[in-house]
Amino acid sequence: MRTAPGRFVLTLAVWLVPLAVVSACNVPVFRYALERWRPDAYEVVIFHRGPLSPEVEQLVNQLREASGDRKQPANVEVEVVDVDGKLDKRTKKLLDAQGDVELPLMVVRYPQQAGVDKPLWTGKPSADVVKSLLTSPARRELAKRLLAGQSAVWLLVESGDAAKDAAAAQLIEKEIVALQKSLKLPEDLEPEEAKAAKQGEKPQDFNLLSALPLEIKFSLLRVSRKDEAEKLFLAMLLGGETSDEPVMFPLFGRGRALEKFVGKEISGDVMLDVARFLTGPCSCTVKQLNPGVDLLFAVDWEVILEDRNVVPEPPVKPGVSVAIPQPTPPAPQPTAETQVPAPTAGKPAVTAEAAPTAARSHASRYLWLGVVLAGFTALLAGAAILTSRNKPGASAS
């Protein structure tokens, strides 16, 4: 599944028209996502006719218990549907799409927020499928690294070609070293300064909810396509697409994946764009207006919070309008009179739809996003001024 390069820009522009402009947050995107963004839930629908067998009923209970587990809650919801009963339109459409199938049937769907109609997996419910759906060795390792405060984990899905996979891994590891040396936290704060900020010495700079060290740190994790333990995890990532090339996914926050980058798309420029976005200020704090798709994890992400009474940002239902902080407009280019180097314009953005999709023309897309945001800022500001001038009693200029 691939998206047109400008779709993210166009969608964001439409959202911004009716929304108010407020100041940005300078907590890095990766840290804001880890501390505040609740993962969207995957849907498991089990179709049956008549009473459930004891085996299937046990699987249903296992999924429900996983969702409500206090130690390792999974972002999954289960629905049991008797096909002889009354079905709502959405459920009937899902059942009809499966054709003539044997019941009971288990259908796993991406979160509604992902906007993907095609199921992630369909088949006969079994203990092995449920176990593979809820967790896997790779996801446990990913969660361990993210909960330790890593900015992102670059997940490499191997192609099976040893030479291609080794070359891709070598490139990623080389770029990781360079990125950790060159990138800075928002406001150019060094890790020591950021630690002081979270301890209250600079509350005006950072608003962190955990005591994790705030630093720019990346790592590489490789997964084989042939690993049966990762079968459903790979299905989440690849969305049913096949390729004979290595595929890279940047993962951050609470197991959120950005776009997938295939073969030659795995490059230093792409990694720099993504890393700048993840380590830059989280200027759009509403999760659903940021790129990426949540993966299914059975993890207590809130274990890092110093105050567990803090309520992370709840998922936004599709179609619900919300006010969002707008990124700072790009700075103008220097003139001959000033001779002052212009600061870097805004943060780069990366898009994702369903299983994260490949990127095209990143630099131009990010430039257009900045232009669109700046234009709407001016438009909204002008509208506000005109409205105030047209109010009764307003003085004419």
Image (tube, grey):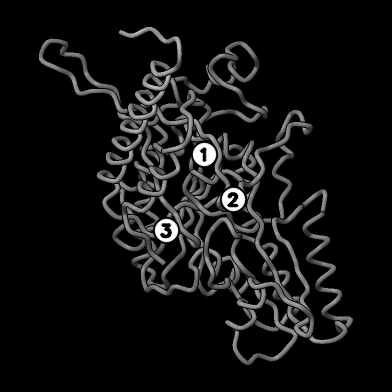
Residue 135, x across and y down, in percent:
68, 62
Q: Which mark is residue 259?
A: none
Quadrant (top left, top right, bottom left, bottom right) of the C terminus:
top left
In the rendered structure, which disc, 3 or 2, sits on the residue that comes first in sequence?
2
Residue 140, x across and y down, in percent:
66, 55
Q: Nearer the viewer, mark 1 or mark 3?
A: 3
Q: Nearer the viewer, mark 2 or mark 1?
A: 2
Q: Mark 1 points at which residue?
A: 151
Asked which quadrant contains residue 175, the reply is top left
Q: Is mark 3 on a helix, strand or loop?
A: loop
Looking at the image, which residue is at 53% across and 72% down? 118
How many C-alpha atoms fall within 10 Å of the one at disc 3: few (<14), some, or many (≥20)?
many
Q: How far apart are marks 3 and 2 (CA)?
A: 14 Å
The amino acid sitting under disc 3 is Lys
Q: Mark 3 points at which residue?
A: 260
Looking at the image, which residue is at 41% across and 70% down? 159
Looking at the image, which residue is at 34% across and 67% down? 163
Please say if 190 is above or below 262. Answer: above
Residue 148, x across and y down, in percent:
63, 39
Please say if 324 is above or below 258. Answer: above
Q: What element carries label 2?
A: loop
The amino acid sitting under disc 1 is Ser
Q: Residue 255 carries which label?
A: 2
In the rendered structure, which disc, 1 or 3, sits on the residue that comes first in sequence?
1
Q: How far apart are marks 1 and 3 (CA)?
A: 17 Å
Residue 23, x across and y down, in percent:
48, 23
